[in-house]
Amino acid sequence: MEVTLLGTGDTTGTPTPGCSCDTCERAHEEGVERTRFSVHVRNERTGQSLLVDASPDFRYQFLHRDVPLPDAAVISHIHFDHLDGLGNSYRLVSDLPVYAADETDPKTGESVAETVRRRYDYLDTVTVEATAPFEPVEVCGFEVTLVPVDHPPLVCYGLAIEDPETGAKLSLTGDTSFGIPEESREVLADPDLLLADGIVPAELCKHHPYGGKHEGPDGTFRTFGTKHMTIEGAVAMGEELDADETRVVHVAHFVPVEEAFEDPLAVDGERYEL
């Protein structure tokens, strides 16, 4: 299993257009980026590729990373920075099965699968495969399991991707607070690599209208506001899930420059062999 981090940033990415903060300036100087979130997972046994979330930066990411176009995709939720890249499948791929959860979201009145189907009904290349959470499906030779996480007000899903032949396992928390349900944690547990949502350091919770929540034993907030883990929360989640390695993704440009490009914060282009 070859995992390539195509996009490791939040909604605006780093550097953010029009921003001259120290973190964005450092990103320009060092030639590093965090484009909108997306992960490429290649099955080296079958030669197939799975795309996790379709970033609006799809075209840019595939031009700048040495990875093949996807044979299938999984969409975690319907926020634009995880979904709107699907339109790039037009004229690029001949067939793209898209796997998404089939649970109805009380906020929207439809499931993620139904939203994807409605929004991209004009694309003959996109075929939506409605998928039940906690029920593994075979995709690109992998066993893929969607699990509910906590990203109010919309439903959102993390996922585990396992190679049944080699035992390699990649887990992604999806966009979430630290309040991931226990049943979901059990599916995500024990990965070789965990990609955990950690948007900013906990110290910045004082600037959020809702502050922070899910305090750790030392009082550190592990959730920033209500929707995303803090960086400390993402690291703690990796420890609780017993991940061999944790990389923090969905990182905002608000991270202070002295911390912004240090481990375990990921940047675009990182590649892992599991």
Image: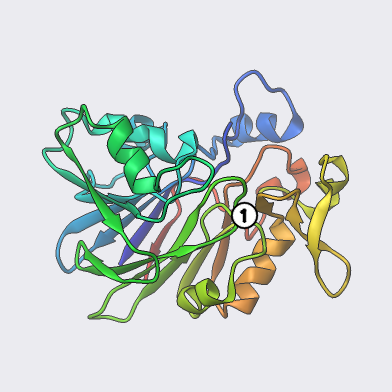
Q: Of helix, strand and loop, which one carries label 1?
A: loop
Q: Is residue 98 visible?
A: yes
Query: How many numbered dots are placed on residues in this image?
Result: 1
Q: Residue furthest left?
A: 94
Q: Nearer the viewer, residue 231 or 108?
A: 108
Q: Quadrant of the N terminus?
A: bottom left
Amino acid type assigned to the residue bearing label 1 in the image? Leu
Q: Is residue 127 left or right of residue 103?
A: left
User: Up-down: is 187 above or below 255?
Assistant: below
Q: Is residue 164 left or right of residue 226?
A: left
Residue at the image point whose x is 60% and y is 57% from the top: 150
Residue at the image point whose x is 16% and y is 60% from the top: 47
Look at mark 1 in the image and give the residue it sits on.
Answer: 265
Q: Nearer the viewer, residue 40 or 86?
A: 86
Q: Position of residue 261 (x, y in %)?
A: 65, 48
Mark 1 nearby-residue class (10 Å; few <14, some 14–19, many ≥20): many
